[in-house]
Image: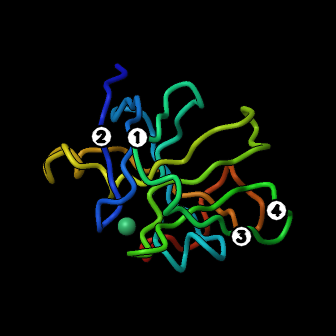
Amino acid sequence: MLKTYRGSCHCGAVRFEADLDLAQPTYRCNCSICRRTRFWAAVVRPDGFRLLAGETELTQYLFNTRKNHHYFCRRCGVRAFGVGNETPVGRMYGVNLGCLDDVSDEELARVPVTFVDGRNDRWQSAPEFFGHL
Ligand SMILES: [Zn+2]
């Protein structure tokens, strides 16, 4: 069931609200940027994401096909969310579960995680090794 959660970057400059169902799969990926940042994403429809503060603090980072828009706070460096413009289900937000403010450790520990082999563009498959992601 969808519930509205609040989230923020580390310094608090960037704040957002997202409608999430934490019983649905979330994603950890081995691609070049997810591996480096250990990004833990919940997928959110564009109408389920609201940036509440910090638009001017966000820096956009683009690479490779430049289709996915990666954002980080220019003050604290935290990646609270990103935008995938051409995902298999259209334009979607990827919200970093580690940035949610109002979720207990116990709730986070119960969230289902799907591992994906983004490095090889195999988004439906787990990589051979994923315990480190
Ligand atoms: Zn920040």
Look at mark 3 in the image and give the residue it sits on.
119
- Where residue 92 sits in the image (x, y, percent)? 64, 38
What kind of residue is marked 1? Leu
Mark 1, residues whose alpha carbon is within 10 Å: few (<14), some, or many (≥20)? Answer: some
The mark lying in front, picked from 3 and 4, is 4
Q: Secondary structure at mark 1?
A: strand
What kind of residue is marked 3? Arg
Q: What separation in Å lies between label 4 and label 2 (alpha carbons)?
A: 28 Å
- Mark 4, ligand 1, within 8 Å: the answer is no
Look at mark 4 in the image and give the residue it sits on.
66
The mark nearer the N terminus, 3 or 4, is 4
Quarter of the image for residue 126 reads bottom right
Q: Residue at x 50, y 70 (%)?
A: 130
The mark nearer the N terminus, 2 or 1, is 2
The answer to whether mark 2 and mark 1 are in CB contact below 8 A is yes
Q: Residue at x 66, y 76 (%)?
A: 32
The mark lying in front, picked from 4 and 1, is 1
Q: Secondary structure at mark 3?
A: helix
The answer to whether mark 3 and mark 2 are in CB contact below 8 A is no
What kind of residue is marked 4? Arg
Disc marking residue 6? 2
Look at mark 1 in the image and give the residue it sits on.
52
Q: In the picture provided, is 108 more to the left or to the right than 85?
A: left
What kind of residue is marked 2? Arg
Q: In the picture provided, is 20 more to the left or to the right than 44?
A: left
